[in-house]
Image (cartoon, helix red, strand yellow):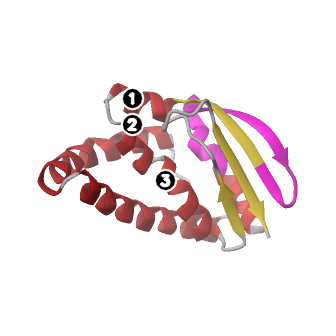
Amino acid sequence: MNDQMPYLERVKIQAEILLPLFRVMREELGNDRACELLRSAVREYATSLGESVSSQFPGTSLEKLKAVAPVFGAAEALVIEPVEDTEKHFFMNVSSCKYAEYFKELGEPEFGAMLTCEIDAPMTKGIGADVTLERTQTIMSGGSHCDFRWISD
């Protein structure tokens, strides 16, 4: 995660490779099976990413999460509105998301949600089992904003 490339650019590169593959899988296997396979790969990637974050940053699991959060908003990819930041809570809303804009332009918001939004929960778990993420909506899935609520035990 100490990469100099903004994470949004990494996602665009991932999409250049994975979107054509996903489209072929969707054609050959059907949407449900293609989504199931992509979600499985994304969970594995995200868990590994969380474990990497956990080993790179000091502090509690929630402190590690707070330290890495700016990586995803780099290059103005996200407009973040802080809600609560305490020892046990890290709450924020995202009111604008360039990830969502990018995948909507491609006509693939479902794919975009799997590739970007769905990394959050398994990455959180990879950082530490004592932190959970609660989120009820995302911009990518048509919500007015993304409501991130990380809670430490």
Quadrant of the image occupied by residue 52: bottom right
Question: The disc labelled 2 sits on which kind of residue?
Answer: Pro
Query: CA gap, disc 2 to disc 1?
Result: 5 Å
- Considering every residue shown, the one lying at the far right of the view is 86
Asked whether 30 falls inside the magenta stretch, the response is: no
Q: Is residue 125 left or right of residue 107?
A: right
Q: Residue at x 65, y 49 (%)?
A: 69
When the figure is inspected, residue 140 is found, relative to residue 47, above or below; the finding is above
Q: In this rendering, would 14 be left or right of 56?
A: left
| Residues tagged 2 and 1 counted as in contact (Cβ below 8 A) | yes
User: Mark 3: which amino acid?
Assistant: Glu
Left or right of residue 25, residue 9 in this image: right
Q: Which residues are magenta?
A: 69-90
Q: Which mark is residue 12?
A: none
With respect to residue 100, does 54 lie above or below?
A: below
Task: Tell me which residue sits at (33%, 36%) in the image.
Answer: 108
**Residue tagged 1:** 104
Which amino acid type corresponds to the residue marked 1 in the rendered image? Answer: Lys
The tag on residue 109 is: 2
Q: Nearer the viewer, residue 26 or 150?
A: 26
- Residue at position x 51%, y 63% in the image: 49
Which residue is tagged 3? 118
